[in-house]
Amino acid sequence: MRSSFFEKIPNLYFIVSGTGVGKTALNSFDFALLGAGLGNLNLVRMSSILPPYADRIDPYQLPFGSLVPVAYGFRTSNAAGSLVSAAIAIAFPKDKRFPGLIMEYDSVGESSESAEKTAEKMAVDGIIGRGLELDRTEAISSEIISHDKYATAFAAIVLCYNTQ
Amino acid sequence: MRSSFFEKIPNLYFIVSGTGVGKTALNSFDFALLGAGLGNLNLVRMSSILPPYADRIDPYQLPFGSLVPVAYGFRTSNAAGSLVSAAIAIAFPKDKRFPGLIMEYDSVGESSESAEKTAEKMAVDGIIGRGLELDRTEAISSEIISHDKYATAFAAIVLCYNTQ
Amino acid sequence: MRSSFFEKIPNLYFIVSGTGVGKTALNSFDFALLGAGLGNLNLVRMSSILPPYADRIDPYQLPFGSLVPVAYGFRTSNAAGSLVSAAIAIAFPKDKRFPGLIMEYDSVGESSESAEKTAEKMAVDGIIGRGLELDRTEAISSEIISHDKYATAFAAIVLCYNTQ
């Protein structure tokens, strides 16, 4: 019988954000992951759907080195004085048989609040564009001002699984 | 016994393409995925081999929110009047013990037909460069003209699994 | 019980590098993967942690078409006479309960030796930044001079699994 390669469908999720500063772009990204509680995991980036009936849980420490499906937005800058922001949002349709839609947005020169509104609007547009009625949104964001090093703003939705 | 982390090997695949228009680049990408029938899935992008003996099937709706291994090409533009195209091709070697090679190509200012030929040529070059004889190719592509919004052309090969 | 979506944690790894030359950027990347022994696999890129207690093994040929979690760095150039390099490094903390940190670095105009030192330094900075003491590093790199085609330098850490 044909099936998805990965048969399980994620049924839990949590939302985190963080910022980081480092001597290189990649180090600042790594420290932003740490700040978000994801720094010791193997993030597998995906585009970006919240499965129907998934339950939101509080962030928790997944086992070190786990492969973790994640949708995320981020922005890195080393321009002195830049306001760096990243946001991620989920728009949920009223019809619960359909999945939530996740959208990311990142920016330089914009507050996290503004970035979050944009991400929410993008997710809402995707739900409306599917011909569905909007129920509500959830979102998270972060911001940081870069100085003499690289600074990264990061925001993510982590998918996990309840074996019961 | 040492093994691949993911022990199964995909043994089915299907080929899809689509286009989308949206107010942001990411929204147009999302609508292109919807157009291709993949809009409610979690695409995990990989580089880009068709396992030996995999069977082609007709596209079908995978369960919402599934994690799905996909090779894809895409191009997004908001330049007024641009012809945006994306293509993906598989080249199959005569020796069926070897896998097919998948190549993506995307362009602005080129038709989907032209993009598809380029993707096919790239995949054939990869097979020849492996010292293998070419059997045949399969390909798909899409094109769209951008106007006042973002437009995305998308083409993909989806790997899935026959549990029997 | 909540758990990672992918329940297993990789417990083996190997390190490879390679270079490739091709008529397009993607073909040169594909040939670099072949040179590294990964050319017939489906690489799933992740960011980039070596799980605690994972054992290093010699590179071996995974089954064609396998999905393989990989951290990698690469650089492609077609500028005539460019020295293209890519490196990847792991820094291990003294406290073995914590994972290793993987960092990638790539460059044009720098030797593989120099790129490798940079990748090692980045990985060490990440361990120190976690408040951990450094045990040691491991690294690999590659370099190639581009001529009239595209040239890619590639370096990777492959995660796999010992079922016993």
Image (tube, coloured by chain):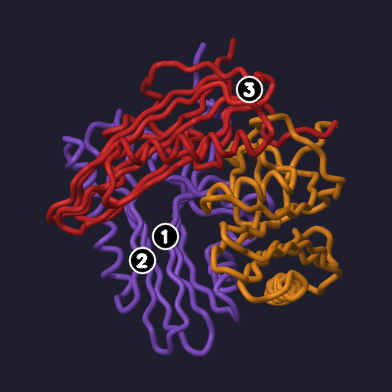
Chain colours: A red, B orange, C purple
Which amino acid, by three-letter code, is at mark 1? Gly
Which residue is pictured at 24% across the width and 54% down the height?
A: C122
Query: Residue A75 has which mark?
Result: none
CB atoms at circles 2 and 1 under 8 Å apart?
yes
Q: Secondary structure at mark 1?
A: strand
Task: Identify the residue position indicated by label 2 in the image.
Answer: C106
Which residue is pictured at 71% across the width and 62% down the height?
A: B88
Query: Residue A52 has which mark?
Result: 3
Q: Quadrant of the C terminus of chain A?
A: top right
Which amino acid, by three-letter code, is at mark 2? Asp
In terms of image quadrants, where is residue A135? top right
Dot 3, crowdedness within 10 Å: few (<14), some or many (≥20)? many
Q: Secondary structure at mark 2?
A: strand
Q: Quadrant of the N terminus of chain A?
A: top right
Inter-mark Cα distance, 1 to 3: 35 Å
The chain carrying label 1 is C
Q: Viewed as shown, does residue A96 lie left or right of B161? A: left
Query: Residue C73 has which mark?
Result: 1
Which residue is pictured at 55% across the width and 78% down the height?
A: C21
Dot 2, crowdedness within 10 Å: few (<14), some or many (≥20)? many
Marks 1 and 3: same chain? no
